[in-house]
Amino acid sequence: MRRRDLAGLAALATTSSLATPALAQAEERLLLELKDGGQVTIQFLPDVAPKHVERIKLLVRRGFYDGTPFHRVIEGFMAQGGDPTGTGTGGARDLPDLPAEFTNKYRFLRGTCGMARSQSPNSANSQFFIMFAPAPSLDGQYTIWGRVIAGMDAVDRIKRGDQARNGVVVGPDKLIRARIVTA
């Protein structure tokens, strides 16, 4: 081979090796398909809640969230889903609960996504909620794992629950499909 050909191959190899890490670092996001074609894009926050982000991704890959209801929706507060039973008592029974991953970096603002829990801060499993409005009382009490970056209008259209029944929804809207996309 001539020297010129070797230089070209070396340049190609350098360019290819630089491109590979960039592809590996492509940002993953969560895409929720709601009723009537509504789509919600959520940016994961693995820097503050790596275990919770990995749990959400695992469940999405399993198809766990597909067809699950938003069973508790409180006007001016939040929409909660991620329970296949629709009762607020279900979860991914084959997976252990997660320890809390609290942060001071983010606050519970409109569009913030947090993990619901059954009792202690270390009892999050599969259920999550999306905030309609700021709720500073939740800061440092629940794990923040993401934030809505597009489609908040679709979140706003989720059917609300009965205030007298703590937001329990009769005939709830469902999360049609959840999938991971690359930005």
Image (cartoon, rainbow, N blue to C red):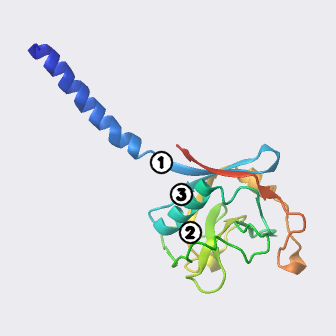
Residue 144's x, y, as percent?
A: 56, 69
Question: Residue 108, image x and y in percent?
Answer: 61, 69
For residue 156, above or below residue 27: below
Q: Give the class, few, some or many, for how many residues have Cα within 10 Å of label 2's Cα (few <14, many ≥20).
A: many
Q: Residue furthest front?
A: 94
What amino acid is labelled 1 in the image?
A: Glu
Mark number displayed over residue 44: 3
Foreground residue among 68 and 70: 68
Q: Is residue 153 left or right of residue 112?
A: right
- x 83%, y 79%: residue: 166
Q: Secondary structure at mark 1?
A: loop
Which quadrant of the structure image shows residue 83?
bottom right
Q: Earlier in the sequence, mark 2 or mark 1?
A: 1
CB within 8 Å, label 1 to label 3: yes
Task: Tell me the CA gap for discs 1 and 3.
Answer: 9 Å
Among the two numbered marks 1 and 3 on one chain, the one whose residue lies closer to the N terminus: 1
Q: Earlier in the sequence, mark 3 or mark 2?
A: 3
Residue denoted by label 2: 144
Q: Is residue 143 above or below residue 154?
A: below
Q: Quadrant of residue 91?
A: bottom right
Give whichever of 74, 37 is nearer the camera.
37
* Mark 3: few/some/many CA within 10 Å (<14, 14-19, 20+): many
Instruction: Categorize mark 1 by other alpha carbons within 10 Å: few (<14), some (14-19), many (20+).
Output: few
Q: Going 55% across and 79% down the picture, which residue do you hit?
A: 140
Considering depth in this image, is 91 or 153 the residue closer to the camera?
91
The x and y percentages for residue 45 are: 50, 60
Q: Are marks 3 and 2 in contact (CB under 8 Å)?
A: no
Q: Amino acid type of disc 2?
A: Ile
- Residue designated by label 1: 27
